[in-house]
Image: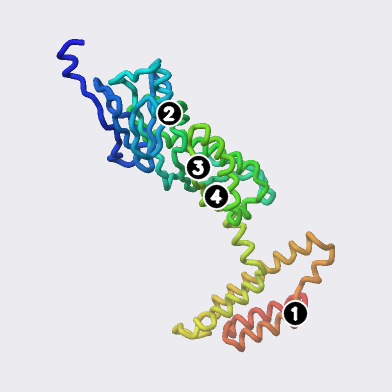
Amino acid sequence: MGIGDFIKKQFIDVLQWNEDGDGVLAWRYPMQDSEIQYGAKLTVRESQMAVFVNEGKVADVFGPGLHTLNTSTLPLLTYLQNWDKLFESPFKSDVYFFSTRLQLGRKWGTPQPVTVRDKDFGMVRLRAFGMYSYKLADPKKFFTEISGTRDTYTVDDLEMQLRNLVVSTMSSTLGNSAAPFLDMAANLGVMSDAVKAAMTPVFERYGVAIDNFAVESISLPEELQKALDTRISMGMAGNMATYTQYQTASAIPLAAQNEGGLAGIGASLGAGLTMGQVMTEAMRTAQAGATTSAPAAAATEAPEVRLGKLKSLLDGGLITQTDYDAAKAEVIRQITGG
């Protein structure tokens, strides 16, 4: 080695990583032409680990603390370098620092709907979204399986790999779930625990420990959600006769505030009542046709009852005298066959 080369070289006495920015999981100490002195100090802070790598092979791993570098603290590197008795100083070795802090608030979601069997709806397509957190637990595995010899390896670099694992496991869990879609919202915690348990050994393979996993929502695609909303609306409507009575009762206090009073909206209420009766009769007839063979006349209201109802509406001011006379004439015509 020439005198110029000797002067050019730098000898490292202290190795440490200040973690200037967030999101870095692995960082290689910049060696270039530098060499490490025998007895140099290695500072590993809390939430860090350090790894010495010799010619691509992981040697010694250090946890948090202040370490003096010698043959006793670097046994594997000593073996790989064939140092029998004397520690060669200075020496070359790649040194990598790893962040073991929790990586919180990582989002995941199924990019495409997952088709599953559902006992209520048959075949449905579901989407799922949520959050998870993890930390680097085994830097040796992580270096060997993931980060390699790159100068830096970030959370974003790892994100795609982990997200694919999460989505694959979540899709399998949804496909094997016996819970119907309508019950899944009440079982998100159970599903979260199941997915976390399934992912734990997968993450460990890469030296990563999953800390928390949460399924925040499971939803249908937009077109299926609209169909479900329609079905829910029909169920909420229930008995149309009761629904019509509710509409009529709700309209009475509003009518008193109108300029025409109760008589002013009689015609519109009459039309609404007629529509409600038609819908109620249609539903009643359909139900009777599906469950019994009784004559349709059994579901027909008696003329005197209809006249009584019309008279009550007239007395209450809900229909006009003209509406009452016309409806009464129609009932009498049906009775006499005229």
Query: Helix, strand, or loop for circle 3?
Result: strand
The reply to whether residue 291 is visible in this rendering is yes
Question: Where residue 166 appears, x then y in whole percent?
Answer: 52, 39
Q: Nearer the viewer, mark 1 or mark 2?
A: 2
Q: Nearer the viewer, residue 69 or 208?
A: 69
Quickly name the residue at label 3.
210
Q: Mark 2 to mark 3: distance in Å?
A: 17 Å
Precedes in sequence: disc 4 or disc 3: 3
Q: Nearer the viewer, residue 296 or 333?
A: 296
Q: Amino acid at mark 1?
A: Pro
Q: Mark 1 to mark 3: distance in Å?
A: 74 Å
Question: Where residue 124 appears, x then y in whole percent?
Answer: 62, 45
Q: Nearer the viewer, mark 2 or mark 3?
A: 2
Q: Nearer the viewer, residue 242 or 61?
A: 61
Quickly name the residue at label 2.
143
Tell me the tag on residue 303: 1
Q: Amino acid at mark 2?
A: Phe
Query: Helix, strand, or loop for circle 4?
Result: strand
Q: Amino acid at mark 3?
A: Ile
Q: Nearer the viewer, mark 2 or mark 4?
A: 2
